Every structure is written in structure tokens, then in C-alpha cells.
Image: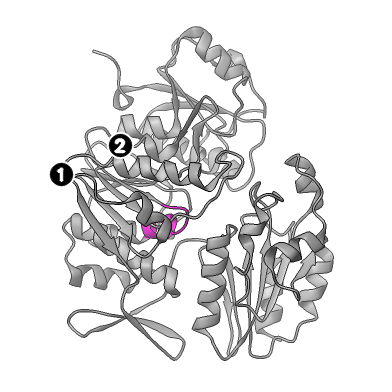
């Protein structure tokens, strides 16, 4: 009988420093598995977390001698290249080589798998579901791409949990497996939260990108459930009910009201449930999570009881500092759809306040001249809109130089402020009048080390 992940004793992780890969290493160690790993660069917080668990490699780099015949398997992360010396050695020895999604699937074959897909909202929806399940003390495993409040790890694999909640990324599975991650989990319950073209380096056209979601939708098995945003035009193109054996559930934004800068959900019992997240996109995320929880046997009143205590996913419209007439938020937003949703949400939540919003272009797609026109009119909501990018990142990603005026042209906003120097950006922000003004900082990077805590203090304690 072939060995399975539950019986594996010795595993090696190639690219163990990645955000999800180091969490997998920690989760496997927690299960009692002997884990080793390698990486050519490991940053915080992965470095400290691996070190505390005794899993930090003695030195950075790739060492084929670590790959030995007594390993049960090797798990390779996306950061590695196809010619990685350790990967080549594993293949030479005929060892089992898994991508992250392959391994998660193999480890959860006997569980009900709930996979949350979509260009935007999937982390928040996954976070909402996990929060509700934990609030009601349900047993569950999970794999999610962001650090969640109250959860030590982003991956949990146990023997007895009957279900696993997986954030289903559409990016590639590994350097040697070009399939999108969410195709490999083989969901029983699937969610498509929205489709907005991304990852231009892998999916060169909108049609090719959308096709990955059509494949995901059609992978829904007999007696399975597909939950989708019924108002998203791109989603509508891939979720046309095609199987009489699949349950199709559409959702829209949850009914709500705003009062004194706070959002309240309106229930069928005419109750008003205060929530700590806001914005049209989050109201859709709540609806999606509610539909999933309903499939898992969570009643409406129990869902609302739990959701009132949900503080949001890390770096998703995360409150940095709040004052009497100013708030500072940070957000992971970087794609056009996320940028528009986040900036619009904050402006609508505080309509009487001025909004200064800053976006860092940091990903391959966002810095690509061929993709930039997708940002047209997505940054119209703020009173002051600022875009920052570091020219050195363009060089690193082997992209052509990007003139600031080309960025302004792409966003279709004549008064857009464009900076390529983080010190100049900081100076511009320090000079703003923060009376009755909110600040929103959006990036998947760090604005090249800009101290947001200091800036937030200045904004709020002006």
C-alpha cells in the first residue's frame, strides 16, 4: 500500500521561506513530522518563526546533499526555479515531488474540501468562514494565504477534522506544474467571488485568465455546490448552470445600513447587526461566507452572532490608528478591482471627510505597461490620489522604464500625484493638512520602508 501524507515521517521543503510554505513547515512539525527545508532568501516574519521552531536552515542557498533517498517526499514552492539543484536531485532519485496544492489535496482526501476562489475577496471570505467556525467550536482544517487574527498558523492539518477551508489562488502551482493552484484541490463546495484579469505574466489575455475560472466551475462534482457573485459580469460568463447535479448559489451584497460611520447588517428578522468591516466589497464577502456556512450547517442567527465579533483579515482594510476626525487604514490592494473597491469603500464610509489615498505599484502586472490601462478610473474616489513605484523594482522584474506621465495617463486622472522616491512621498504626506482627513495606504509591498506607524501618529495626533 503506497505511503500517504498522513503517514509521511520525513519531508523536505524547497523554498521553505515563502509565506505559505513556512506555515506548512510549522504545521507539519506540529504534527510530529521530521521537516527540513532550504531557501536562498528568508525574510521576516518567516525567519523568526522558523528559527523558534528549530526549522531555520543553517545557511541560505540550495544544497542537493540535503535530498536523500530516505525522504518520503519533497514539497516545492513557487519561489524555486525548474532548474533548482535540490529539485533536480529529487527527480534524479525518483522521490515524490509535490507542489503545495498537491500536498494539501493529498493530505485532505478524506475531508470535505471548501475552496474559495476569485480575483479579489477570497482571503476575506476565507477569514470570515474560519472565524464563524471557530466561534462555534467546529472542527476544521485550513490553508489560507494571509495571517489571521487569533490563528497562530496559516495552515492546519489534523487527522480528525471533517472539513478543510482552502483559499484557492489562481496562480501557478509550482515551477514544474503550470496548473492554477485552485484546480488541484478538487473542491466539494467552490466559491468564485469575482473575476478581474491579473497575473499578466502567466495569463496574457483576459480570456485565458477567465478560462481558469470556467475550468474551476466545471470541476464542481455531482452533489457539489458552486457559490458565486451573481452581479459580476465576468463570473456570469463562467458559472452558467451546466450540470443538473450541481447546486448553484448566487449572492449579492448583504442588506445593510450606515449610521454614524458604522455599518449594520439587516437580517430577515429585522435585526441590526453591527459589524467591524465596511464597504460594498465586504458586504459581498459576508454574503459569500454566509452561504458557505449555511452549506456547513451554520444557522443564520449563529452566523450573525459570530460575525459581529469579526475584526477583519490582516492587511485587508486594516485600521492602523484612529482619532477624533481622522483614521489611517492600510490594505493589501494592488490590482485594479481591489484598488477601486477599497478606495471607494473608505470614501463612502466617511463621506464628509477628505480622503488621501496612496497606491504602491509593486507586482509584475501593476508595473507592466501592457496592463496599466486596466487602472483607468479605478482611483477616482479619493480627493487626493497618489501612486508610488520604485524604478529599481522594474529593473529587478526586467520590465521597461515607466515614465510617471505614462502612469498618470493610464489612470486617466490628470491630478494624480506620481512619486518614484519614497522620501519625496513621505515629505508630500507630511505636508498635508490632516484636519477632517483620512489616509489610506495600499500595497503588497512596504513603500520601501516608509514608517507607517510614525506617519499614522502624525495624521491622528496632528
Tell me the mark number nearer the camera, choosing from 1 and 2: 1
Instruction: Give the residue pinned by disc 2.
Output: 186
* Camera sees residue 183: yes
Viewer-proximal residue among 349 and 246? 246
Q: Is residue 318 visible?
A: no
Residue at x 61% of width, y 55% of height:
444
Q: Are marks 1 and 2 in contact (CB under 8 Å)?
A: no
In this picture, residue 431 sits left or right of residue 231: right
Snapshot colouring = one colour
Q: In which quarter of the view is residue 4 placed? A: top left
Instruction: Give the percent coordinates (x, y) of residue 17.
Output: 58, 37
For label 1, count other residues whose C-alpha is less than 10 Å away and answer few (under 14), some (14-19) or many (20+): few
- Badge 2: residue crowd in 10 Å (few <14, some 14–19, many ≥20): some
**Upstream in the sequence, badge 1 or badge 2?**
2
Q: Secondary structure at mark 1?
A: loop
Q: Dominant secondary structure of the magenta stretch?
A: helix
Secondary structure category for the residue under label 2 = loop
The residue where tag 1 is placed is: 245
Q: Which residues are magenta?
A: 118-127
Label 1, label 2: how many angstroms apart (C-alpha)? Answer: 16 Å
Q: Quadrant of the C terminus?
A: bottom right
Residue at 72% x, 51% y is 369
Residue 291 picture location, percent across and down: 25, 61
Camera-side residue of 18 and 215:
215
Residue ID at (45%, 62%) = 313
Quadrant of the image for the N terminus?
Answer: top left
Residue 438: x and y in percent read 62, 81
Amino acid at each position: 500500500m503506497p505511503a500517504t501524507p498522513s503517514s509521511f515521517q520525513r519531508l523536505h521543503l524547497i523554498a521553505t521561506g515563502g509565506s505559505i510554505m513556512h506555515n506548512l513547515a510549522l504545521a507539519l512539525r506540529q504534527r510530529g513530522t521530521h521537516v527540513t527545508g532550504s531557501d536562498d532568501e528568508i525574510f521576516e516574519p518567516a525567519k523568526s518563526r522558523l528559527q523558534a521552531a528549530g526549522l531555520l536552515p543553517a545557511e541560505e542557498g540550495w544544497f542537493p546533499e540535503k535530498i536523500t533517498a530516505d525522504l518520503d517526499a519533497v514539497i516545492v514552492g513557487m519561489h524555486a526555479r525548474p532548474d533548482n539543484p535540490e529539485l533536480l536531485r529529487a527527480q534524479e532519485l525518483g522521490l515524490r515531488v509535490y507542489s503545495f496544492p498537491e500536498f494539501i489535496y493529498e493530505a485532505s482526501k478524506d475531508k470535505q474540501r471548501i475552496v474559495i476562489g476569485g480575483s479579489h475577496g477570497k482571503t476575506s471570505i476565507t477569514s470570515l468562514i474560519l472565524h464563524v467556525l471557530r466561534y462555534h467550536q467546529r472542527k476544521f482544517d485550513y490553508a489560507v494565504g494571509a495571517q489571521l487574527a487569533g490563528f497562530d498558523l496559516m495552515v492546519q492539518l489534523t487527522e480528525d477534522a471533517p472539513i478543510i477551508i482552502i483559499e484557492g489562488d489562481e496562480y501557478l502551482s509550482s515551477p514544474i506544474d503550470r496548473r492554477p493552484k485552485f484546480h488541484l484541490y478538487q473542491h466539494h463546495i467552490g466559491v468564485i467571488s469575482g473575476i478581474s484579469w491579473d497575473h499578466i505574466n502567466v495569463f496574457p489575455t483576459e480570456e485565458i485568465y477567465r478560462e481558469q475560472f470556467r475550468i474551476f466551475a466545471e470541476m464542481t462534482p455531482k452533489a457539489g455546490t458552486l457559490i458565486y457573485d451573481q452581479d459580476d459580469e465576468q463570473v456570469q460568463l463562467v458559472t452558467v448552470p451546466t450540470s443538473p447535479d450541481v447546486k448553484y448559489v448566487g449572492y449579492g451584497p448583504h442588506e445593510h445600513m450606515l449610521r454614524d460611520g458604522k455599518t449594520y447588517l439587516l437580517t430577515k428578522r429585522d435585526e441590526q447587526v453591527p459589524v467591524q468591516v465596511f464597504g460594498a466589497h465586504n458586504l459581498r464577502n459576508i454574503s459569500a461566507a454566509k452561504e458557505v456556512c449555511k452549506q456547513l450547517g451554520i444557522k443564520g442567527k449563529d452566523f450573525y452572532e459570530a460575525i459581529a465579533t469579526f475584526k477583519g483579515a490582516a492587511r485587508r482594510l486594516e485600521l492602523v490608528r484612529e482619532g477624533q476626525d481622522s483614521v489611517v487604514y492600510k490594505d493589501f490592494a494592488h490590482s485594479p478591482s481591489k484598488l477601486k473597491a477599497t478606495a471607494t469603500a473608505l470614501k463612502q464610509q466617511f463621506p464628509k471627510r477628505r480622503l488621501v489615498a496612496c497606491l504602491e505599484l509593486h507586482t509584475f502586472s501593476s508595473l507592466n505597461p501592457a496592463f496599466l490601462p486596466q487602472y483607468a478610473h479605478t482611483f477616482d474616489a479619493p480627493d487626493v490620489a497618489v501612486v508610488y513605484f520604485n524604478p529599481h523594482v522594474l529593473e529587478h522584474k526586467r520590465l521597461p522604464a515607466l515614465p510617471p506621465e505614462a502612469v498618470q495617463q493610464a489612470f486617466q486622472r490628470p491630478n494624480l500625484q506620481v512619486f518614484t522616491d519614497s522620501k519625496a512621498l513621505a515629505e508630500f504626506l507630511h505636508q498635508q493638512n490632516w484636519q477632517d482627513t483620512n489616509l489610506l495606504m495600499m500595497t503588497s509591498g512596504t513603500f520601501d520602508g516608509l514608517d507607517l506607524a510614525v506617519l499614522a501618529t502624525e495624521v491622528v495626533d496632528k
